[in-house]
Amino acid sequence: MKFAYAFTEKKNLHKLEQKKGKIEVFVKELVDKVEKLTSYKVRPIEYFVLHDFASATKVHSHYPVPAWTTPERGVINFCPEEKRWQNIMKTNVKQLNLPESAERNLLKHYDQWNLDFLLDDVVGHELCHLLEIFENLPDGMDWFEEGLCFYLPRRILSETKKELVKEIYQQEMKLVSYSQRWVKGHFLKDFSAYRTKLHNNLIIFLNDYHLAANATKELVDEIVDGDVREVMQAAEQVSSEIEEPPEQVMKTFIKKLFERFNLDQEKFGSFVRKFRIF
Ligand SMILES: [Zn+2]
């Protein structure tokens, strides 16, 4: 893994370089843990690009958050400026116009977003996009991929910080419910809409990701009893049988998963309704 730097002001280069050592150790250890947990290989990371905030959000991408991965080139891009991340998340909460106490409780959570947290929850997520399984899944399984990329590093983190992981998921679902009047029924069935015209709407962007994370967690932990390896193997097998166009894929996939694990209709129905999968 080589490091590269992208900055708009020369003084930021030094700050980025100082974080390299910690990130390098973290990534190496996490790749091992993810491979052990899943039995899938993580593709080699060719370059890990550290960006300053303007480089990540104005020069090289226009995603609302400054981290993304290009799996076909093995490149992870990440801005390690923790205050910027806190501000993005806090801006999202503030624009929801919530009652003061609800707002305060949500904002408090983001003060924990220091570099260690970003490594666990953001860099961990990005490197999971390099898992080889995702090369074999058909188009249209976006939210399952995103959800799994949240699930795996959080599952590893929960071995040492169980309460924190619980808090992250709860916080996300609170935000989903508070965001409803803004997203107007935008749910998992609309997941990839953010990639087109809605990609720069922060509320919808985060709402989609929080739903994907929570739906995948429920699918793995509550519906299939935590056997993530089995879910991944089933996903690969089931998706090889899917012939539908991308917009139908998740519907068929979830149905086939439920059949495969022989789950009851009621459980299936409530899962589909809760996250409005279709
Ligand atoms: Zn992702």
Image: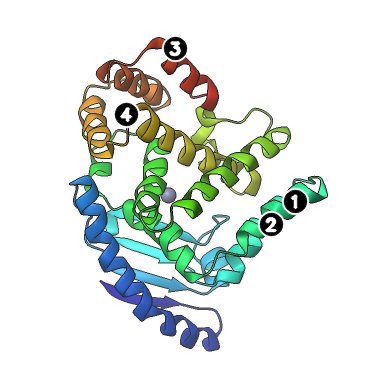
Q: Residues within 10 Å of mark 4 (few under 14, many from 20)?
A: some
Measured as percent of width and height from the top left, residue 24 is found at 31, 74
Measured as percent of width and height from the top left, residue 272 is found at 48, 21
Q: Which residue is mark 2?
A: 107
The residues tagged by marks 2 and 1 sit, at their Cα atoms, a distance apart of 6 Å
Q: Amino acid at mark 2?
A: Leu
Which disc is residue 103 wearing? 1
Q: Residues within 10 Å of mark 2 (few under 14, many from 20)?
A: some
The reply to whether callout 3 and callout 2 are in contact (CB within 8 Å) is no
Which disc is residue 173 wearing? none
Does residue 201 appear in the picture of this structure? no
The reply to whether callout 2 and callout 1 are in contact (CB within 8 Å) is yes
Q: Secondary structure at mark 3?
A: helix
Q: Secondary structure at mark 4?
A: loop
Q: Which residue is mark 3?
A: 266
Measured as percent of width and height from the top left, residue 138 is found at 30, 33
Measured as percent of width and height from the top left, residue 29 is found at 26, 66
Q: Which residue is mark 4?
A: 224
What residue is drawn where x is 61% and y is 60%?
A: 110
